[in-house]
Image: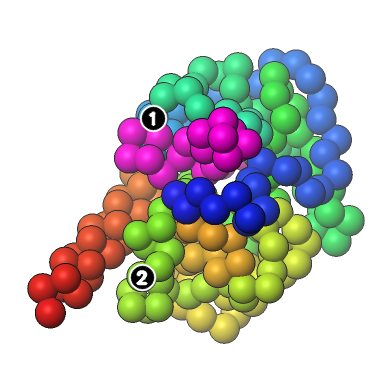
Amino acid sequence: MNLNAGHEPEGVIKFNCLHADGPLPTEDGLPQLLAWRRILHGLGLIGQTPERYDGYGFGNISVRAGESGFLITGTQTGAPPELTPQQCVMVTAWDTRRNEIRAQGPVRPSSESMTHAVLYELDPSLGCVMHAHCPDIWHKGEALGLPATRSEVPYGTPEMAEEVRRLWRETDASSRGVFIMAGHEDGVVSYGADAMTAGNILIDHLARAYALEHQETRR
């Protein structure tokens, strides 16, 4: 992750969160969420900046749960290598027009929850969404031919929700399973029918980015 302190930190919730403290309404999908969160943390795609850079958490993962909601890692839970159910929350409803999310669980939802919500709304077949910070993919996004949100659109806002809808209409984002957030440094989002699919898409593009880097150094 680029640790330029001049960039807006992640972890600042920009939507109205109607949060009900308490146990998770369901744990459907929780084992795969926790397993893949551990993998992404080990790869450095989810984590926390050093204290000298304000110690902000980055990256999150969610899985569809129940008929109309999804489980997601809580805000500012980037530091631990492994999470517990007490560090996850269920988003039960959302309204992008009103910039509002309803959630229930032991912690408040990730600042990127609205982006996850829009993806689940756009494609009922999606079962997992991963938001990683990967400078290797982010900087090679154009070379990899990846769809990208507009650079002026900030994360976690109604504008980002609309931007994701635009990608669905105007690009191959729905079939690629991945896009980059041009206005959110190092931000990469992958998604698929389940956590294995979304995770493999992310790792595959990381390998492709590494391959491009090696090709460039050999020229």
Callout 2 amino acid: Lys
Query: In the image, what residue occupies the spot 68% across and 73% down?
Result: 152
- The quarter of the picture where residue 177 lies is bottom left
In the image, is residue 10 part of the stretch drawn in magenta?
no
Image quarter of residue 151: bottom right
Q: What kind of element bears circle 2?
A: loop
Residue identified by numbered label 2:
140
Residue drawn at point x = 43 percent, y = 64 percent: 138
Figure check: 88 above or below 190: above
The range drawn in magenta is 41-70
Query: How far across and how far down the image is residue 198, in percent?
Result: 39, 51
Quarter containing the C terminus: bottom left
Query: Few, some or many C-alpha atoms within 10 Å of disc 1 (few <14, some 14-19, many ≥20)?
Result: some
Q: Is residue 2 above or below residue 146?
A: above
Query: From the viewer's perspective, is residue 170 above or below residue 45?
Result: below
* Residue at far front of view: 52
Horizontal placement of 71 versus 179: left or right? right
Residue 57 lies within the magenta run: yes
